Amino acid sequence: MRFMVIVPGNEDSEAGVMPTEEMLAEMGRYNEELVNAGIVLAMDGLQPTSRGAKVRFEGGKRTVIDGPFTEAKELVAGFWIIQVSSKEEAIEWVKKAPFDGGTEIEIRQIFENDDFGTEFTPELREQEDRLRQRMTEQRG
């Protein structure tokens, strides 16, 4: 089972305040533990929304909205994608993360091909498998 672990943004992350050396070291130790366990598929921090954009879709119209975005409680500052055997295992790993101060980390399961049922035809599954193979090859 794959899960996305979502680290929320806050006023500091939106202001571009960088973590302290101590926090970077703590996070480095935690990340190393995840990698050593062989469960990390991806992980990164995100730049503030002032450096981002949104694209709104309405009919055939596309509208670009430049950051910053004001709803700080709904922003994402970073993420991990982990592969574990259950939601409970994902929770146990996240509980070890070096956060404090009331931070709430969100854990969301990622859809797998079988979750889509019969609508996900053999042809669509083949296309998905082909795309995933190409992605793996491109990463080298």
Image (cartoon, rainbow, N blue to C red):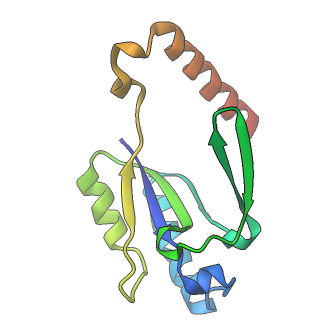
**Relative to 131, is 92 on the left or the right?**
left
Residue 58, image quadrant? top right
**Residue 41, percent from left and from top:** 53, 49
Q: Residue at x 56, y 22 (%)?
A: 128
The answer, for residue 140, to whether it is visible in the render is no
> In this view of the protein, which residue sits in the foreground, 95 or 46?
46
Q: Give the left or right position of residue 42, taking residue 82 as reference.
A: right
Q: Position of residue 99 (x, y in %)?
A: 42, 81
Give the answer, above or below, for where 28 lies relative to 92. Answer: below
**Is residue 58 visible to the viewer in this orientation of the structure?**
yes
Q: Is residue 82 left or right of residue 117?
A: right
Which is more toward the observer, 29 or 45? 45
Foreground pick, 58 / 134: 58
Residue closest to the far left: 88
**Residue at coordinates 73% horizontally, 42% vertically from top-left?**
62
Report the side of 79 relative to 135 (left or right): left
